[in-house]
């Protein structure tokens, strides 16, 4: 499955999936749609070891647990964009409806609907992945702030050096070169 690389071997039963499910595999399943980090129903089904139909049926039977900020159905445009990104295979014609996208809260709610040991273990792995992604983003933002502050300090340093050396400002410099008499 292109969207969730490396997860195809997870169809076998396992006693502790969270130890066998590397964060990198889960991270490949996460997409950014509508400004939210989400996992698609078909990717979650592979991770949980259930069919997409059964996963969606469990959600439909428990609709009160899945408000719009927990799960939403992709539009045709969003699905097309995923296909262009190579995130979704065109399929073999088995899917009749657009996929459902689960936010982090929606994935957490799935553990109350899918009550197997495997579902609990997969949820632990998915939650750890979301936490690691948040930490990584926070570290990247902190680094960007430090670089920005460093750039400003360097600019101020150059201004002081130019003032000490008496380098004229951009508009104050004399023209360099020669002029041809009579040329305009």
Image (spheres, helix red, strand yellow):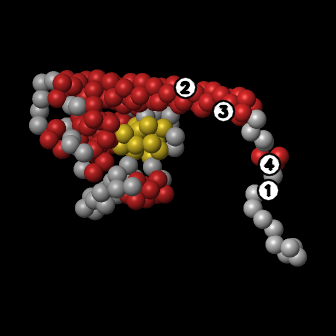
Residues 61 and 183: in front is 183
Q: Decide: marks 4, 1 in contact (CB < 8 A)?
A: yes
Q: Quadrant of residue 158?
A: top right
Counting residues from the start of the chain, the first of labels 2 and 3 encountered is: 2
Decide which of 141, 5 is in the foreground and name it.
141
Residue 117: x and y in percent read 19, 23
Disc 2, SS: helix
**Pointer 2 or 4: first along the chain:** 2
Q: Closer to us: mark 3 or mark 4?
A: 4
Mark with earlier residue (3, 4): 3
Residue position for label 2: 146
| Residue occupying image coordinates x 78% and y 65% | 178
Q: Is residue 75 left or right of residue 90?
A: right
Indicate which disc residue 173 carries: 4
Residue 1's x, y, as percent?
24, 50
Q: Which residue position is annotated with label 1?
A: 175
Mark 4 lies on a secondary structure that is loop
Among numbered discs 2 and 1, the one appearing first in the sequence: 2
Mark 1–mark 3 Cα distance, whole angstroms, equals: 23 Å
Q: Are marks 2 and 1 in contact (CB under 8 Å)?
A: no
Mark 4, Cα crowd under 10 Å, few <14 / some 14-19 / many 20+, is few
Q: Which label was assigned to residue 158?
A: 3
Specify which label sits upstream in the sequence, 1 or 3: 3
Residues 163 and 71: in front is 163
Instruction: Specify whether residue 58 is in view.
Output: yes
- Residue 172's place in the image compared with 13, above or below, is below
Neighbor class of circle 1 (other Cα within 10 Å; few <14, some 14-19, many 20+) is few
């Amino acid at each position: 499955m292109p969207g969730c690389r490396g997860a195809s071997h997870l169809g076998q039963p396992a006693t502790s999936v969270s130890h066998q499910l590397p964060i990198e595999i889960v991270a490949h399943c996460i997409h950014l749609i509508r400004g939210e980090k989400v996992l698609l129903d078909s990717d979650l089904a592979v991770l949980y070891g259930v069919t997409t139909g059964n996963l969606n049926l469990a959600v439909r039977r428990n609709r009160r647990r899945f408000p719009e900020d927990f799960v939403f159905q992709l539009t045709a445009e969003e699905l097309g964009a995923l296909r262009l990104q190579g995130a979704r295979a065109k399929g073999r014609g088995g899917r009749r409806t657009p996929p459902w996208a689960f936010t982090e809260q929606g994935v957490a709610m799935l553990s109350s609907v899918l009550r197997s040991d495997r579902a609990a273990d997969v949820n632990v792995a998915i939650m750890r992945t979301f936490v690691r992604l948040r930490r990584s983003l926070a570290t990247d933002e902190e680094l960007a702030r430090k670089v920005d502050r460093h750039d400003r300090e360097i600019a101020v340093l150059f201004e002081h050096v130019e003032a000490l050396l008496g380098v004229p400002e951009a508009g104050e410099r004399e023209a360099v070169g020669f002029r041809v008499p009579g040329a305009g």
